[in-house]
Image: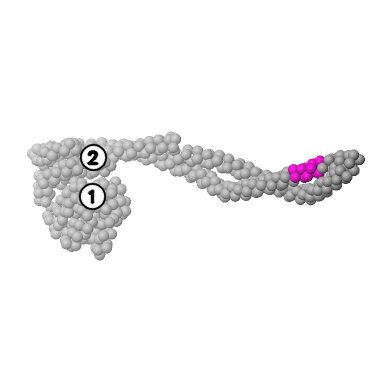
Amino acid sequence: MSTITFLEKQKKKLENQLRVLWSQINYCEDIETSSLALSDYLFNMKKIYMDYTRNENYITLMAERTKQKIDLQLSLFLDGLDKMIQLRENYSEINVKIMELNKDNIEVDKHLRQTFALLQSVSSQTKVLAINANIEAHRLGAQGAVFKIIASEVRKLSDITNESSSNITDTTSKLTSQTSEMTQILNENSNTLINVVEELEQGKDSFVSMYQDSENIVNESMVLDDKLLAIYELIEKVNVMVEYNRASYTNVKKILREQVDLTKEMLHDFNQELGVPTNGFSLIDSTDLYKSFYKSFKEEKVEQCISLIQHALEKGEEASFITTHILERTVETVGKEQIDRLVPLSEIYVNGRIIEACMDILLPLLEKDHKKENLGKVIIGNAYGDYHALGRQIISTFLRMAGFDVTDLGLSVSNEAFVEAVKEQRSNLICVSALILHTAEEVVQLRDLLDKNGLQHVKILVGGAPFNFEPRLVQKVKADAMAANGIEAIKVAKELLGLMHRKVEYK
């Protein structure tokens, strides 16, 4: 092997190493950015906790206030119930006495009526005596004056006796009637009072139960307080770890940049030995390329994005590197930003146009660098309700580049359309892209529909921001695996279809 050939091979290795270093630097920057975002999330969580615990409607305070009010009402209720019970007992005693009085009045009335009957008889006899005295006085003439006086007085005595007897009889009758009415009224009131007391005694259990429930709520809210405080303390610890990791990745990035500088110097020496000019773009501006492309992408400047890609290719950058570390990284970052906000359709459309335009340039170069194989048929599309084409277009390109026969169903594909395509193409793999959580959850129904149609053998490969944020979501939606980028999609697709010996579990 000649010295020049050896130097060229070493130069190629150093260029590849430089690309890896730039990729690692980009990764560190992503971690730093994600750490800052996570710090913001943690700060907001702490703020939510502080605002909640300081709010006057804080559940523990509300529970305690409610318990105190119920406690006061229960005390008043029990005190009122005791008074009602005492009143009921007093009513009973009064009622007994009134009934005894009424009984005595009836007995007195009976005796008085007997006495008054005798008086009536005496009065009648007195009247007869008066009549006889008048007759005798008339018969005797002047000598009968005494009998006349006696007759007059006896008549008065008869009238008085008769009138007094009637008055007393009427009085005792009224008194007896009134005591009877009073007894009846007292009986009715006593029965009403008894019923009220019984109802209150029944309600007492509900009041006591309500008080016990309020006491349990207070106790449970105190447990909740402890758990919230524990969560708050964990947030504090996580925040410390996030800051520590961010600082660590900053230091790693610094070390990697030193390695980049060292590798660039070595490449410069190799180029001097070989007599070739240094490829300035690849060695210097990979990170700047991403930043410039991302800025133009966000500003929806299609021509500027295309110009940056073309300029990078002219400077010698590889199409696969641009696709993986510029386009895919941009798509992933944009996906993270869009996942928590409503994205206008106009923005989605323009983003898709930019990616399509860039891939039109890169795809011929990618296909030229890879020997196509016949790896089988793959169905790809966005989950139903999902209109984010960016990631799907790149994954589709990479799968085609690797030798898969890809049928792209496009945006917002119904589960029925996926199943129908699988049957028509006799495919064993479906790739589903989703940028938002509720569209990712459509995969659950897709799996169920496949199983109902006897297609249990068909695998589901998913991708998109929700799965990158929460890998366990793959299991939740009953998918078989996920892929974060185009290169990984090729590897995972081969593993799912049994085209690679090594099988990897994705958790």
The dominant secondary structure in magenta is helix
Tag 1: amino acid: Gly
Which residue is located at x 20 percent, y 46 percent?
388
In this view, the residue in front, 210 or 162, is 162
Q: Earlier in the sequence, mark 2 or mark 1?
A: 2
Rendered location of residue 317, percent (x, y): 13, 42
Asked if the stretch drawn in magenta spans residue 6, the answer is no
Rendered location of residue 136, percent (x, y): 88, 45
Circle 2 — which element?
Answer: helix
Circle 1 — which element?
Answer: loop
Rendered location of residue 268, percent (x, y): 14, 37
Residue 385, numbered circle: 1
Tag 2: amino acid: Ile
Per the image, the residue denoted by label 2 is 25
330 relative to 498, above or below: above
Rendered location of residue 473, percent (x, y): 30, 51
Residue 321 appearing in the image: no
Q: Give the range drawn in magenta.
A: 156-167
